[in-house]
Amino acid sequence: MPRNKYPEETVQKILDASLKLFLEKGYEETTVLDIISEMGGLTRGAFYHHFKSKEEVFDALCEKLFYETNPFEKAKRHKELNGLEKLKIVLKTSFDETEHHQLSMASMQLMESPAFLKKLVESNQELAPMYQELIEEGIKDGSIKTEHAKLLAELFVLLTNFWSIPTIYPMTTEETWEKFLMIKEITDKLGLPVIDDEIVELCKENA
């Protein structure tokens, strides 16, 4: 069998087909055979040459979409803003209807899977240092008042990426809103007033 001269193109076709199906059908309802059928003539062998499973495709897709639309890099390009303002850009970006955001919403059904929760923990461990960098910048420019940048970054990720997820902590719409306001109160008191009126309104619109 001749070797594939363009493996990057094959991987991209697999990711494109998977993204389309995950968003249309949902992750759980999509099978590897569905992905192969959507791959535009590529074979089953081509799929398994690059990925062992649907889970591996999902991981690669999430990582690719995050780094393509990395809100932290977007925020850091705004040299005119202070650390707190850059953090607000990161939060506001999370409400944008990007493919990464849609895929995150579609993945909520996976929260009952221990394997997926493990991946979520690992990805959030990578997020905390990104928040910490901007918090430290805010401390230096005076926009953030705290002496515990690392701990505050870890706590913020815990509150926003675990405690506020309904599939981990079941809650009504009203309870979700109460929890959001509690996060705002906690972060305000800890010297990180990142949830401003505009973010509150965005949260209301997306509730």
Image: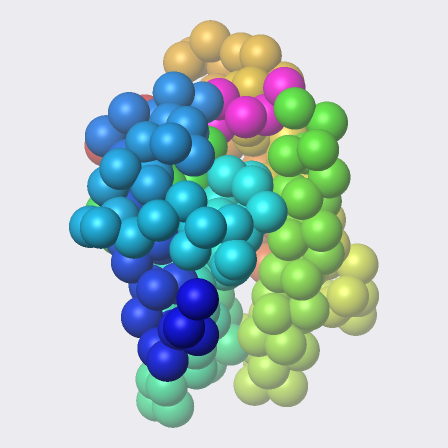
Residue in the picture at 23% in, 30% down: 24
x, y percentage for residue 169?
Answer: 63, 18
Q: Does the segment drawn in magenta span residue 111?
A: yes
Placement of the C terminus among the 4 image quadrants: top left
Residue in the picture at 67% in, 44% down: 119
Between 47 and 70, the one lying in front of the other is 47
Q: Residue furthest front?
A: 1
Between 149 and 51, the one lying in front of the other is 51
Secondary structure, magenta segment, majority class: helix
Residue in the picture at 63% in, 19% down: 112
Left or right position of 167 against 4: right
x, y percentage for residue 163?
Answer: 64, 30
* Placement of 94 over or under 33, stated as above or below: below
Where on the picture, by quarter, is residue 11?
Answer: bottom left
Between 104 and 190, the one lying in front of the other is 104
Between 179 and 18, the one lying in front of the other is 18
Placement of the N terminus among the 4 image quadrants: bottom left
Per the rendered image, the range of residues in magenta is 108-112
Q: Does the segment drawn in magenta span residue 145?
A: no
